[in-house]
Image (spheres, rainbow, N blue to C red):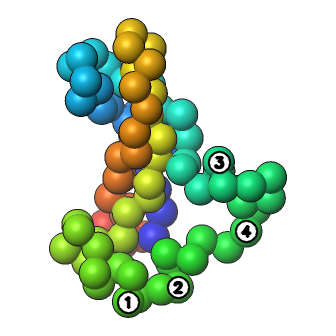
């Protein structure tokens, strides 16, 4: 599984829920967890129970932080990860 946004294959487009303006991608949410979190193994790739209970119908997702440059609202959004054989 790979995130098309993290790997530069797609751009993330999200609208701010507060004001409706385009929000900017601020990277993976896990990158904000700690100083070494970007270099640690992704627990979602190995935790099938977490994936099965996902709101996204058992699809593995990569959580990104988006921020609105207009009103300053920040929130997380989920990007569907690709299977290697899909694309």
Q: Earlier in the sequence, mark 2 or mark 4?
A: 4
| The image quarter in which residue 74 lies | top left
Q: Which residue is mark 1?
A: 49
Image point 55% across, 48% down: which residue? 28
Image coordinates of residue 38 in percent, x first then y, are 70, 56
- When the figure is inspected, residue 64 is found, relative to residue 53, above or below; the finding is above
Q: Earlier in the sequence, mark 3 or mark 2?
A: 3
Image coordinates of residue 1 in percent, x first then y, are 45, 70
Q: Nearer the viewer, residue 74 or 11?
A: 74
Q: Nearer the viewer, residue 27 or 87?
A: 27
How far apart are labels 2 and 1 at the CA level? 9 Å
Res 9 visible: no
Secondary structure of the residue carrying tag 2 is: loop
Lateral position of residue 17 relative to residue 45, left or right: left
| The image quarter in which residue 60 lies | bottom left
How far apart are labels 4 and 3 at the CA level? 12 Å
How far apart are labels 1 and 3 at the CA level? 24 Å
Dot 3: few (<14), some (14–19), or many (≥20) neighbours within 10 Å?
A: few
Q: Which residue is mark 4?
A: 40
Q: Earlier in the sequence, mark 1 or mark 3?
A: 3
Lateral position of residue 46 relative to residue 55, left or right: right
- When the figure is inspected, residue 14 is found, relative to residue 82, above or below; the finding is above
Image coordinates of residue 11 in percent, x first then y, are 40, 34
Q: Which residue is mark 2?
A: 46
Q: Which residue is mark 3?
A: 32
Image point 21% across, 19% down: which residue? 20
Dot 4: few (<14), some (14–19), or many (≥20) neighbours within 10 Å?
A: few
Q: Which of the two marks, 4 or 3, is nearer to us in this view?
A: 3
How far apart are labels 3 and 2 at the CA level? 20 Å
How far apart are labels 1 and 4 at the CA level? 20 Å
């Amino acid at each position: 599984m790979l995130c098309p946004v993290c790997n530069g294959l797609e751009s993330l487009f999200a609208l701010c829920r507060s004001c409706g303006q385009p929000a900017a991608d601020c990277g993976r949410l896990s990158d904000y967890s700690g100083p070494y979190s970007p270099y640690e193994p992704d627990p979602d790739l190995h935790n099938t129970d977490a994936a099965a209970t996902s709101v996204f119908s058992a699809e593995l997702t990569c959580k990104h932080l988006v921020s609105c440059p207009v009103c300053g609202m920040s929130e997380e959004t989920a990007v569907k990860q690709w299977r290697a054989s899909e694309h």
